[in-house]
Image: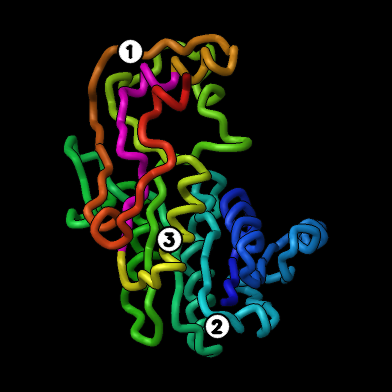
Amino acid sequence: MTVSILGCGWFGLALAKTLVAGGIKVNGSTTSPNKLDTLQAEGVNPFLIDLSTDNANYAPAFFNCDVLVIAIPPKSRSGAGAEYVPKLRNAVTAIIGHGVTKVVLISSTGVYADRNKELTENDDTASDTPSAIILAQAEELFRQQTAFKTTIIRFGGLIGPGREPGRFFAGKKDIPNGLASVNMIHQDDCVSLTRAVLHQDAFGYTLNACTPHHPPKAEFYTLAAVKAGLPEPQFLPELKEWKMISSVNIPEVLAYEYRIKNWYDWLK
């Protein structure tokens, strides 16, 4: 099997390293020339790929693969969100042009509006913020395609190397919505769950990927700060708009068991 990963960032590179260790040939892309050597050192075939709207530039060999994993973030917070869907349209053109038949699109549970209830893949996202609307448009772009099958994986809040939760709110005060549920997933589960999709040939699905334990923000982030030896945050004991992300498809389609089942155990 050959897997091409479009976007070898925080998640993409971790996935690439795990796949290489399992004997899978991996093509990995970056937009940064100085990262090519890093990819090669990890056993990844490196490609410099630019799918910007003004200059879609890539080596055709990158798309010579059994599965394409798209792991490029929208970067809405940095003001680059408007470029995301046009980039993905260029990717779709390349996918169809080179005959790729299986795609994994990494999305986010941020596509859901806060609806004060538990939400699964069977619920409408009701996307209501600019960043959520961009994610919804990206997902719909891939759902509309008939030349290839896509599995969309919506990751919750990302935790892992370089993303330690104890640092998120350390020392801050009067943080709102302290009783709202957290919807998080560790990098290890991100990688393992994606591998399960590949190995089980599970394409054509939408998967909400969150650890099925949703403690209140105040408890979770306070314990995380204590574990990291950082000043405790202070949350307001209130419940405003919230959501709890669950999945009906991951148990039914993949029978996947999360590596981290309880955040309190993990934090201890």
**Amino acid on which the number 2 mark rests in the picture:** Ala
Residue 60 vertical position relative to residue 14 in the rendered view, above or below:
below
Residue at the (41%, 64%) spot, across then down: 197
Residue linked to disc 1:
236
Left of 261 or right of it: where is 36? right
In this image, 31 relative to 227: left or right?
right
Would you name the residue on which mark 2 appears? 94
**What separation in Å lies between label 1 and label 3 (alpha carbons)?**
39 Å
Q: Which residue is mark 3?
A: 196
- Measured as percent of width and height from the top left, residue 239 is found at 23, 22
Is 219 magenta? The answer is yes
Front: mark 3 or 2: 3
**x then y, percent, for residue 259:** 43, 41
Residue 86: x and y in percent read: 50, 70
Magenta stretch, residue numbers = 206-221
Does the rendering let one see residue 129? yes
**Left or right of residue 131: residue 240:** left
Residue at horizontal 22 percent and vertical 53 percent from the top: 248
Give the secondary structure at mark 2: helix
CA–CA distance in space, label 2 to label 1: 49 Å
Depth check: 200 or 139 in front? 200
- Give the vertical position of 257 relative to 39 (above or below): above
Q: Residues within 10 Å of mark 1 (few under 14, many from 20)?
A: few
Quadrant of residue 223 in the image?
top left
Q: Are marks 1 and 3 in contact (CB under 8 Å)?
A: no
Kind of residue at disc 3: Ala
Magenta stretch: includes residue 49 = no
**Left/right of residue 129 with respect to residue 41 in the rendered view:** left
Which dot, 1 or 3, sits closer to the camera?
3
Residue sitting farthest toward the front: 22
Question: x%, y% of residue 145?
Answer: 36, 80
Q: Nearer the N terminus, badge 1 or badge 3?
A: 3
